[in-house]
Image (tube, rainbow, N blue to C red):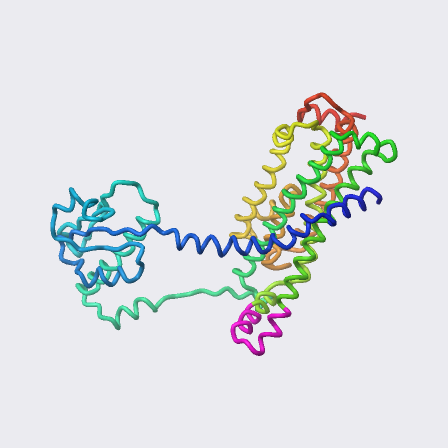
Amino acid sequence: MLILKREYLTRVKKRSFLLTTIMFPVLYIALIFGTGYLGSKAKQKLDIALLDQSGYFTDSALAMVNAMDSSTIFTPVNDTSVQSKYKEAGYDGYIIIPAIDWQTGMKNIKFITDKTHGSGTESMIERKLNIIWSETVNEKLGIDNDKKTVLSTSSISIKEENQQNKNANSKVSATIGYASGFLIYFILLIYGSQVMMGVMEEKTNRIAEVVISSVKPFQLMLGKIVGISLVALTQFLIWIVCVFLVYSAGKLMGSDNAIASSIVEGIQQSFASVNLPLILGCFAFYFMGGFFFYSSMYAAIGSAINEDVREAQSLSFPITLLIIFAIFMMTIAIQDPGGPIAVWGSIIPFTSPIVMMARLPFGVPGTVPVWQLIVSMALLVIGFLCTTWLAAKIYRTGILMYGKKPSWKEMLKWAFRK
């Protein structure tokens, strides 16, 4: 308990903890909206000379598509000499539309330029030309505006209705699944590496030798893991409280503000589509279970390393790779939450903290049977007990080992030494 208290208080009292707690959600939101804003501002503006020999790409048609997006402008030209001096004329490239049959069209019309542009530029040019071409084909076929309206609006759409939960929404479930999975992913990587670096620091400073004279190596390792996990849980709870306060403030504003009212109503509908107490309870369990499972391995690696950070990165890479692999399985599980990959990924302890949290928002017991949830939790408990036991065996030897570069083979010998 003394070790746990020390690990928890020293980290929570740091100014960096307060800054990361406040700045992480702010930076995350800024990242989402900022990338979209920068992407829209970073679009390269192109002026493309268009030599039309078909007669279909008229000035009025080109003006219509130019008004849709100013990043790509088509300028009609009749002088064929522009092909040899398009740069001098101020164009970024040129396109020649040959005399083509409206019934067959033409594939692979070339956009001649002096450099390779991104795939987005090619798609934009193609989309604009196809808009004009579709209008031409409709006119040739005698499809008037009324018929075009019917063609564009007449379609079949499907909305899934869950008989056990009428408010279920697959898009909301997928969003919550992604958010839960990625949050556990970041916590495992960030705080798991903190466990490893903390153990390395105590070892290199020879503090561990003094501490182990009073406590067992297993107690020292467990105190560090539990203490740091409580730091991460504290940070998460602060974020939950902030979200609740923002939601409550929006609810109070909703009566006077139509925009705030619509946002609050949307959030209420999202919350109604999932079993929120179950999601939060399972998140706490899988967060703690996954943290114990992986942090014990990070602690074992930290105990075996001396001062070489590159060596620590090399030995911890397989563990990091397992966490990244869990994210890969999570994306598959969200696409098919009842599929075999999702089921096995949510049961195996190496991936279950992330994959199961991605599946749970889709419904229990509908998409996730109760037996799968119980088996997943039981195996995760058994898994972190086994990894903690093995890590403690490695920790017992590694924490007092100096001057020798360990390997996974050497660490396994320490683990199974009596």
Question: Where is residue 27 drawn, in percent x and y?
Answer: 56, 53
Q: Nearer the viewer, residue 266 or 50?
A: 50
Q: Quadrant of residue 195?
A: top right
Question: Where is residue 332 drawn, in percent x and y?
Answer: 53, 48
Q: Quadrant of residue 379?
A: top right
The residue that appears at 57% across and 48% down in the rendered structure is 342
Q: Is residue 250 magenta?
A: yes
- 43 with respect to 335 (left or right): left
Image quarter hosting the C terminus = top right
The residue that appears at 45% across and 55% down in the rendered structure is 36
* Residue 71 versus residue 396 in the image, above or below: below
* Residue 120 versus residue 144 in the image, above or below: above
- 304 with respect to 54 (left or right): right
Image quarter hosting the N terminus = top right
The residue segment tinted magenta is 248-266
Q: Is residue 243 magenta?
A: no
Q: Nearer the viewer, residue 2 or 142?
A: 2
Residue 403 visible in rendering: yes
The residue that appears at 43% across and 53% down in the rendered structure is 38
Quick one: which residue is furthest to the top in this view?
Answer: 403
